[in-house]
């Protein structure tokens, strides 16, 4: 027996998402993922002064506005042939890391964990404690995580003035110089955040969490430990989340936190994982619009890409079901996000989890929490490396004719901006957001996107209208539809 389910909106962050499932013999046989609203920021940017991009693109999203700003600044810097001074790089890394870590907390505590407090899980041994701690709006964890998140964002106030929608990130560096006294304040913010993570999220010091290298070590570490990651691991083991939500096991990362490893290399390496780590080639990216409500007859590199929405009679395009384009890397489906970053970077625990069961709900959530333990010590090093009195931003001149690419890693994954300047104005601007990669529709060959593949095979109970396991898989990718359709 076959039936069709349409699920949506998914409204904890950005609800403009519909997932249509074909269910056969109690399992998902196929899935279509639809971004159902169009926004058009790429059109807003055309014919504007290039510096206007620094004002406009952060408005794409209220959660990752710094990431959008960083990508725009990087594209302008690339167009101008500009490099940041060391202080500028360090401050930019700190600002971006602050937003990414705050986003990891938001995802885990506000978007992902509340699903396990639902009445459908009432018979599970862990339900009562999970409901008390993670129930949406009233769970006791909120009283701890929201103040801790707000305290972390004080770092953003010191370095970027405000969040979201700061103008502190510029092509030549950052606008806010740091004094020796302010370095002490920044370290105090990080010390308090480190203590919260150790006490509440992990129940252990960050260095011990970072050193876990296998699934067996993770299970042994979590046994009897009272903290939120061990609580999630107990739930994941009971529900088999290590075997839910596998996509292609191909992963992409643009590399995160420039020169952040102390040896001139980014903290997390750039590359592609397809059974082994491979070098990244920006020219291998193409966007297909075969199943999108957009004009276009062939896949294009974003440097030559266009975004022309279909309207009126043209909106009845055969086979179209979303406003999301279908990005492909060398013609392949790739997944992006914290798991992808750590797979490319070679993090032992994540590679072990993927080797055992593939990319999964468990692996994606563990990757996000693990980044909290990996990045905070790096942020402490970056603050100590700041040199008061030296430049934070280089002066620069805008070219009348140029093109540039800005590639950064947001919390959700790889974010790219492609810019073309003609006669001193923006003549082309294309954006590929992390959710565009993960929630892409089918391409011209009919190959489903990453989430569409990850949903196939999931069990759906008789009469179940909104399968919980489907929601767990969708939320493990952390959808953000306003970024997708910008």
Image (cartoon, helix red, strand yellow):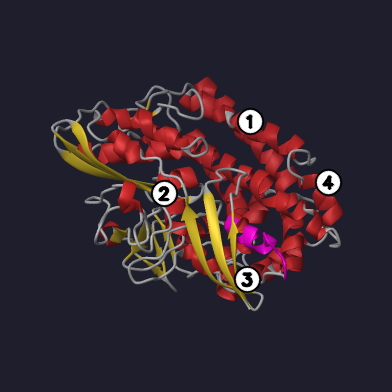
Q: Quadrant of the C terminus?
A: top left
- Please indicate whether residue 40 sits to the left or right of residue 481 in the image: left
Contact (CB < 8 A) between labels 2 and 3? no
- Please indicate whether residue 50 sits to the left or right of residue 348 in the image: left
| Residue 412, placed above or below residue 157 | below
Q: Which residue is mark 1?
A: 150
Q: Which residue is mark 2?
A: 433
Reading the chain from its start, which is encountered first: label 3 or label 1? Answer: 1
Q: Which residue is mark 3?
A: 458
Please tell me whether mark 3 sits on a helix, a strand or a loop: loop
Res. 260 visible in picture: no
Looking at this view, is 280 or 381 the one in front? 280
Q: Which residue is mark 4?
A: 132
Please tell me whether mark 4 sits on a helix, a strand or a loop: helix
* Residue 283 location (% of width, % of height): 25, 59
- Magenta-highlighted residues: 462-474
């Amino acid at each position: 027996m076959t039936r069709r389910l349409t699920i949506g909106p998914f409204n904890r962050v950005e609800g403009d998402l519909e997932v249509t499932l074909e269910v056969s013999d109690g399992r998902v046989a196929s899935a279509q993922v639809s971004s159902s609203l169009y926004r058009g920021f790429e059109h807003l940017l055309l014919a504007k002064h290039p510096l206007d991009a620094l004002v406009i693109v952060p408005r794409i999203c209220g959660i990752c506005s710094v990431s959008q700003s960083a990508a725009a600044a990087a594209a302008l810097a690339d167009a101008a042939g500009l490099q940041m001074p060391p202080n500028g790089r360090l401050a930019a890394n700190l600002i971006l890391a602050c937003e990414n870590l705050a986003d990891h907390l938001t995802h885990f505590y506000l978007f992902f964990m509340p699903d396990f407090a639902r009445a459908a899980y009432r018979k599970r041994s862990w339900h009562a404690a999970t409901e008390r701690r993670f129930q949406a709006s009233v769970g006791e964890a909120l009283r701890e995580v929201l103040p801790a998140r707000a305290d972390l964002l004080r770092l953003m106030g010191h370095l970027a003035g405000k969040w979201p929608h700061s103008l502190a990130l510029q092509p030549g560096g950052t606008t806010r110089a740091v004094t020796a006294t302010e370095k002490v304040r920044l370290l105090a913010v990080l010390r308090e955040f480190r203590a919260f993570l150790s006490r509440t999220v992990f129940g252990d010091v960050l260095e011990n969490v970072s050193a876990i290298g296998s699934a067996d070590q993770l299970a042994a570490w979590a046994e009897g430990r009272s903290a939120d990651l061990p609580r999630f691991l107990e739930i994941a083991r009971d529900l088999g989340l290590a075997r839910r939500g596998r996509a292609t096991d191909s992963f992409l990362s643009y590399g995160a936190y420039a020169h952040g490893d102390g040896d001139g290399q980014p903290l997390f390496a750039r590359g592609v994982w397809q059974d082994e780590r491979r070098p990244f080639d920006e020219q291998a990216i193409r966007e297909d619009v075969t199943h999108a409500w957009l004009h276009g007859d062939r896949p294009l590199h974003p440097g030559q890409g266009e975004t022309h929405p279909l309207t009126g009679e043209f909106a009845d395009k055969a086979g179209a079901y979303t406003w999301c384009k279908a990005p492909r890397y060398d013609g392949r489906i790739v997944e992006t996000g914290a798991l992808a970053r750590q797979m490319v970077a070679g993090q032992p625990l994540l590679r072990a989890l993927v080797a055992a069961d593939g990319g999964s709900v468990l692996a994606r959530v563990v990757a996000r929490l693990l980044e909290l333990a990996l990045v905070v010590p790096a942020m402490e090093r970056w603050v100590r490396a700041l040199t008061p009195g030296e430049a934070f931003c280089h002066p620069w001149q805008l070219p009348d004719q140029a093109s540039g690419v800005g590639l950064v890693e947001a919390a959700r994954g790889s974010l790219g901006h492609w810019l073309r300047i003609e006669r001193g104005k923006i003549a082309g601007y294309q954006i590929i957001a992390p959710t565009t990669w993960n929630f892409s529709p089918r391409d011209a060959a009919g190959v489903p996107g990453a989430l569409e593949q990850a949903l196939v095979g999931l069990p759906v109970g008789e009469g179940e209208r909104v399968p919980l396991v489907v929601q767990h898989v969708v939320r493990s990718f952390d959808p953000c539809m306003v970024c997708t359709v910008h």
